[in-house]
Amino acid sequence: MMLTLSKSLLKKIKNDQSIFDVVEYGSAVKGKLDPKDIDLIIIFRQTTLKERLEKIQEFKKEITDRQKLDLNGILWEELFSESFFARSGIILEGISLIDGKPIAAKLDFHASTLFIHDLKNKLHTEKVKFNYVLRGRNGIGFIERLKGVHLAPGVVQIPIANSLEFEEMLNRHNIQFTKKNILCQG
């Protein structure tokens, strides 16, 4: 569940030339039902550290649900630095609170998770049942419901916003898997 900004705060952010975007990322945007906190980052254009810290404090005061808020700020250039560990999470799963668009889409990509699962230790009946879960038997299967794509036997691509739900389903069925977050152009 994404954080919603008040109209007055949204207007203030849009009119502030020093702010490029405000991005929510982390488990809340990946579909976790009860995230422990809300991860936000303000991406600034060229400003001093003092100005950034002041704006972050102003922003915190205007958000009502502060007890679960993890708010940080960064310069646009720093977002792409190898030393900035949250960069992949922000680019892959981040959602702009200004316009509601994924950050990946703003860079002409779409973010997904590639799941590679292995059924070799399952009985034939377990494999058939699991296939019904994935593809559906008389209705919509899990892959279609989550707007995913079956790429090959044992390989499924799921939009990153639905990846936690797909992962939980694999765990419930005791399916061994590996996963990789990916960016696909356009």
Image: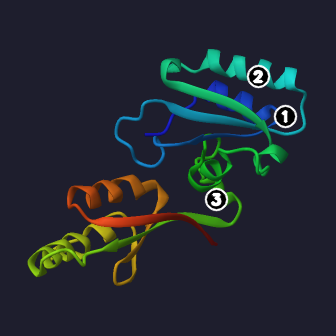
Within 10 Å of the Cα at label 1, are there few (<14), some (14-19), or many (20+) other Cα atoms?
some
In this image, 20 relative to 28: left or right? right
Task: Identify whether 124 is placed above or below 91.
Answer: below
Q: Is residue 54 visible?
A: yes
Residue type at mark 1 is Ser
CB within 8 Å, label 2 to label 3: no
Query: How far apart are the two marked residues, 1 and 2, measured between alpha carbons?
Result: 10 Å
Query: How far apart are the two marked residues, 1 and 3, measured between alpha carbons?
Result: 21 Å
Q: Give me the disc on residue 168.
A: none
Q: Which residue is mark 3?
A: 104
Q: Earlier in the sequence, mark 2 or mark 3?
A: 2
- Rendered residue at 57%/30% (across/down): 5
Q: Which residue is mark 1?
A: 18
CB within 8 Å, label 1 to label 2: yes
- Rendered residue at 48%/39% (across/down): 2
In this image, 109 relative to 120: left or right? right
Q: Which residue is mark 2?
A: 55
Judged by depth in the image, the label closer to the viewer, 1 or 3, is 3
Q: Earlier in the sequence, mark 1 or mark 3?
A: 1
What kind of element bears circle 3? helix
Q: How many marks?
A: 3
Query: How far apart are the two marked residues, 2 and 3, measured between alpha carbons?
Result: 25 Å
**Spot occupied by residue 67 in the image (x, y as percentages of width and height):** 49, 18
Q: Is residue 6 visible?
A: no
Residue type at mark 3 is Ala
Within 10 Å of the Cα at label 3, are there few (<14), some (14-19), or many (20+) other Cα atoms?
many
**Spot occupied by residue 69 in the image (x, y as percentages of width and height):** 54, 25
Name the image quarter holding residue 155: bottom left
- Rendered residue at 25%/72% (across/down): 134
What kind of element bears circle 2? helix
CB within 8 Å, label 1 to label 3: no
Q: Nearer the viewer, residue 16 or 185?
A: 185
